Image (cartoon, rainbow, N blue to C red):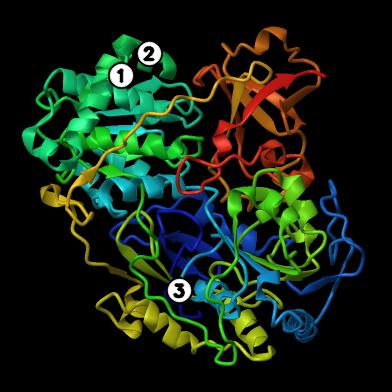
Amino acid sequence: MPEKTSPVITACILDCPDACSFLVEPENRTIRANPDHPFTRGFICRKGARIFERLDAPERITRPLVRRKAKKGLQRGQQIGPAPEGFEPISWDNALELIAEKLNSLTNQPEAVLHVRGHGYRGVLAQASLNFFEALGASTTHGSLCDDAGIEACIRDFGALDHNDPLDLLNAGRIVNWGKDLKRSSPHTGLLVHEARRQGTPVLTISPGGDGSDGWSDQVLRIRPGTDRFLAAWVMHQLVARNCVAREVAQAVAGWEFFQELLQNLDAKSLLRTCDVDIRRAEELLEWYTPGKAPANPTATLIGWGLQRYRFGGQNVRFINALAMISGNIGRTGGGAYFNIASGRNLGRWRAASPGRSGVPSRRSFLLPTLAWDLEWADPPLEFIWVDGHNVVNQVPDSPAMAKALQRPFVVCVDGFFNDTARCADVILPPTLMLEREEIVGSCLHHFVNHAAQAVLPRDECRADYDILRDLGARLTPPVSFPEPGKCLQTGLSLLQTDLESFRARGFAEAPHPPVAFAGLRFAHPDGLYRVPVSLDPEPDDDPEYPLRLLSLVRGSFMHSQIPENEQQGLPRVMVSPGSPELSELDLTGPIYLATPLGRMAVHVQLDETLHPQIVLIRRDGWVSLGHGPNAIIEPHVTDMGDCAALYSQCCRLENR
């Protein structure tokens, strides 16, 4: 009987805050949580547990492909055989020679080359494309489709992006979950909240709905979407009016007198009217933040990654942070405000070299939330676009415009599936996926750095992005060179007190950070003081033609657009409240369309009594080419700070014709 081999210690490199540690048994292709990892703690989510379905998917692209026909953009229901329609296989050598020829022709026009990089995979070697195109001086993108508004808000408030160790949630006297989907977006945060409730810590969730929060909370407060800052302002208005702000807290706030006056001048009834919360429920929330009324341990505040996706999303986060601060819950064990941390803050950065290039002092950069429109007017125009880790056509607002913008340039898409972006490419390069390559990855939630060992062989001709770009760089004139992979990995560990061999053997290391952020009310601004918002901006007026708000919320089973095509058959489902004002004139038995000023899509409607009446909820990231992509009808709006896409400020309606 053959000897049983030990499982491989590896890790998740998907775009998830939990950054789980895995044990993989390659022979029977099983994956389970690493019970010895202090944060993973023997539990992984469905997205990680199903990774072999993605690796072994019959529709996966495993050989380089080149387009043999003129571009057509997005075609609904295009069939995939041995090669997708319009494409034919090409050898790696010929594919890279073709790409190198295009790049060499643009050596003196680096601004005509655009690199679009997402977070489809993360890690130290995943820096390869960033470093490669930086060495070329190519155009890049800035801004975010996700969390940059909240990140900028936290930096403005605290002076740095930081929060308490998430395990400190177990020391909280109370937990206020402000809009976080504890089931789908960070299952380990949900696990900690569940454990805290088991030991007697009450949990209050504030949300417009759609997050299954009832099963994770002792109380749920429904709020009008996008208006969180008004509810936080009301609570602070009451704390100031009742003299509940401690002297040491006020002294730690820069401009406290001005902020106090700002709060006092607000109309309390108007604040609650704006966020659609009645006085009784608001008073209940006030008790959770009133010093002396809460338990001996303070109140911890979780801030979800949705309330920053509105026009005033940064301000939403800033007012919630300010509430946690002036109620005396910052800088204390069991308290804190949790948004996120930088997943790369514990990783060293290596560089690519190209000595023959003079360098570009200022690279051209395009705003990601408006990329579809900006590329149309780019001057000089783009001639070459490289997309990796990002189904950009699917993810940006106005997806059809993004597909149109990719028609003129030569487009290389590094992806294993014929998704919305790959359909617009000239060359598709198949990368190795998670478990098929080695990586070192950090977390934007906890302080552990994980080793993602290669657990299985790459499928067919798939190659790691690092290897693809190193090979391509050697074909350029002048060349772009990378350090050896081992040296890159060791550089990635340079901020930790460990060597690569020991790190590989254990599978993880903990970065040295204090368990409590901003202890002693000392903040990262030069003067050590906290910063508060200087204004409270009103909500944009409702559009009577489109009275509802479209929320494209996170899925539980799949990471972003990494969704099998067989899971996207039929009409996409949207959910609305039985109290929605649209239902009175809508025939639920006939054809139904979700409409915005940008267009409309056919949908199936289901009722959900947990939703705020103003919401239309759809699960995000379905493919536009299959009729499931909401970004096809979402307009490019930008948040108040952080250059983030205001995806949740989209007005909409439901109609039968």
- In this rendering, would 113 be left or right of 122? right
Looking at the rendered structure, the kind of residue marked 1 is Leu
* Cβ atoms at labels 2 and 1 below 8 Å apart: yes
Residue type (three-letter) at the residue carrying disc 3 = Val
Front residue (pair 459, 491)? 491
Distance from label 1 to label 3 (Cα)?
A: 48 Å
Q: Which residue is mark 1?
A: 266
Looking at marks 1 and 3 on the same chain, the residue that comes earlier in the sequence is marked by: 3
Report the residue at 45% width, 50% height from top. Answer: 148
For the C terminus, which image quadrant?
top right
Horizontal arrangement in the rendering, residue 136 relative to residue 173 (left or right): right
Quick check: marks 3 and 2 in contact, CB under 8 Å? Answer: no
Q: Position of residue 99 (x, y in %)?
A: 75, 79
Tag 2 residue: 270
> Where does the image place residue 123, in percent across and percent down from the top left?
46, 69
Few, some or many residues within 10 Å of mark 1 (<14, 14–19, 20+): some
Q: Which residue: 56% across, 77% down?
A: 360
The label on residue 212 is: none
The answer to which of 287 and 645 lies nearer the viewer is 645
Q: Where 543 falls versus 190 (above or below)? A: above
Which image quadrant is residue 202 in? top left
Q: Secondary structure at mark 2?
A: helix
Percent coordinates x, y for residue 229 in the rendering? 37, 29
1 and 3 marks in contact (CB < 8 Å) = no
Report the Cα–Cα distance between label 3 and label 2: 49 Å
In the image, what residue type sits under mark 2?
A: Ser
Q: Which residue is mark 3?
A: 124
